[in-house]
Image (tube, grey):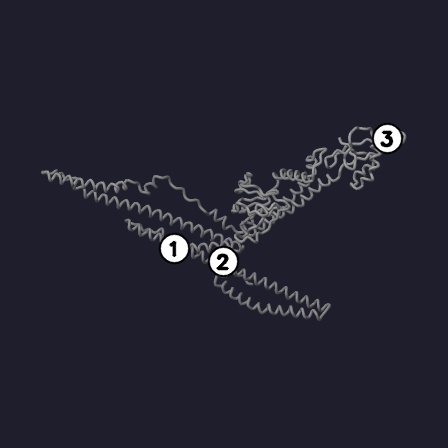
Amino acid sequence: MNNVSSHDWQSVQQLLRKHQQFETELVLLAQDIQRIQQESKRLNGRYAGEKEAEIKQKEIDVLTQWKLLQQFVDQRKRLLNDYEDLHRFFGLARDLHLWMDVMIRQMNNSDKPHDVSGVDLLMNNHQSLKAEIDARQENFIMCINLGKDLINRRHARSSEVKDKCIQLSMLRDHVDDTWNERWEYLQLILEVYQFARDAAIAETWLIAQESYLTNEELGETLDQVENLIKRHEQFEKSLLAQEDRFNALRNLTTLEKKRQLPPVEPRQSRLPIYLEEFKTWEERDAERPSTLTDKTKFQSTITEEKTTTDGSIRSTILPGKQQSSQDLESTINKQRRSESATRLPTLKEGFLSRKHEWEGHERKATHRAWEKYYTALINNRLQFYKDAKHLKTGRTMTDDLQLDSSTSVAPAIDYRKKTNVFRLKFQDGNEYLFHARDDIEMNEWITAINNFISSSSITTSLITQIPTIALTSPPTTTMVPSSSSSSSSPQHPPPSTMISSTSGMQMPQSSSTTEQKSRTLPLRSSSSVEPQVSSSSSQQPPTGKKKSGGFFSMKRK
């Protein structure tokens, strides 16, 4: 298990061949391990007690060492393969670098044409260079992909690989820019030389016609004059035939038009794009927020919500009216969302591609295209923005996805078209696919959503228990005669004080200990309290109002 970081490509190849021979020898050792297991199984049936325990322990020790050896062998093989790919990457990068330098020198040669035929020759040579550049595109893509693979494997020399990938990408852009500039220059020069050729031909024709124009002969006889007239008509026809050529000479060339235009701004450098594309895992981990910090903030927020729930319940329920447990829970959830939306931190954020797969349990979504959003997990919702700036301003691109305890998230193993995809299912049948940048980011999203779902289910169960207790314990009032009054005097109910129960009902409070106990009794014990209620109520002054309240009498405010 010696170090291979300082070896070259040939040495790594030699070490790989030795490792393959060592793996072949391990096959024989695996057969010996199998025989040891069989012998141990046979001896366990013959021995008992300490001997049996000693045989089992020996077998466990051998198997432990065997598994440890296999782990070392796999680790060694991965290390050798990584360094083989590393040296292969550096070799490809070196060859591509040298080739691109040669291409740039050939395109920047000092050969300048002198006529149209020379420009045509240079343009043909330049097109052959373009064909060679396109032929090398496959090697360039293979080299860049190999570099990305080494970075994703967290290779020890990932920083060197990143620098080499950026250098190759920038040099390739320089090759493309140089070829395009050279091609544009050749096209301009071709147009200039074509203008010069046409101008020379036109000048030659004008010089040839100059002798006719300077001739002052007018003819002495009728026949001579008629011949001169015919000759002049022929001259006019030839002049009309040359008119298109002279009109073409009046047009400005592309070079002259370009001089009249304002200078073109240089193309923006693609270096920031390549720095982001070939980012190493150390840089990604440094930029990624701490998951532990987010979990701590989220748990503290959940605790704050539970402490404020008791106070919000009393303000939610109107006095003298009862609400169902379901309505009360929905109202509490709305208040909880509105109060915590402004103070909850962003639990997870980043770019994700989303695809709506199902709109219901048996109906596929009408729009199933992949769309890329800057996704943020805030409170109990997945919110979708254009970028991080829109997240700060709160300008979403589409509707939010509300998470609850019935939501499920898991990797989409059955989806084959893309990797690093996870599926989000809702109780109403809606299903969404999300595509992450890599496997680690996908697992982080799944963990963050699952942590929220589990915390949400616990919080929901705690919240729903509070209104259930308040609504299943109806207010009771028990009037007990005062012990200090005589039996002959009229009986009056003792003074009572109105208190408010947790359900928002006004309840009379008596100083009697029996009444205090009866208020805490369950419903099934109401029969034992009925005689006291009836005796006390019979001695009250008639009010003319019908009593209500189920099994118990209740005096409303």
Within 10 Å of disc 1 (Cα), the crowding (few <14, some 14-19, many 20+) is few
Q: Is residue 160 visible?
A: no
User: Mark 1–mark 3 contact, CB under 8 Å?
Assistant: no
Side of 120 where 208 appears, left or right: left
User: Mark 2–mark 3 contact, CB under 8 Å?
Assistant: no
* Rendered view: 488 above or below 462: above
The furthest residue to the left: 221
- The Cα–Cα distance between marks 1 and 3, rounded to whole angstroms, is 115 Å
Amino acid type, residue under disc 2 in the picture: Leu
* Residue underneath mark 2: 86
| Residue at figure coordinates x 63%, y 64% from the top left | 64
Amino acid type, residue under disc 3 in the picture: Gln
| Residue at figure coordinates x 31%, y 47% from the top left | 190
Q: Nearer the viewer, mark 1 or mark 2?
A: 1
**Local SS, label 1:** helix
Question: Which numbered disc flags the more N-terminal residue, 2 or 3?
Answer: 2
Given residues 136 and 419, the one toward you in this image is 419
* Residue underneath mark 3: 491
Given residues 130 and 166, the one toward you in this image is 130
* Rendered view: 75 above or below 433: below
* Residue underneath mark 1: 132
Residue 124, position in %: x, y?
33, 52
* Rendered view: 296 above or below 546: below
Within 10 Å of disc 2 (Cα), the crowding (few <14, some 14-19, many 20+) is many
Question: Which numbered disc flags the more N-terminal residue, 1 or 2?
Answer: 2
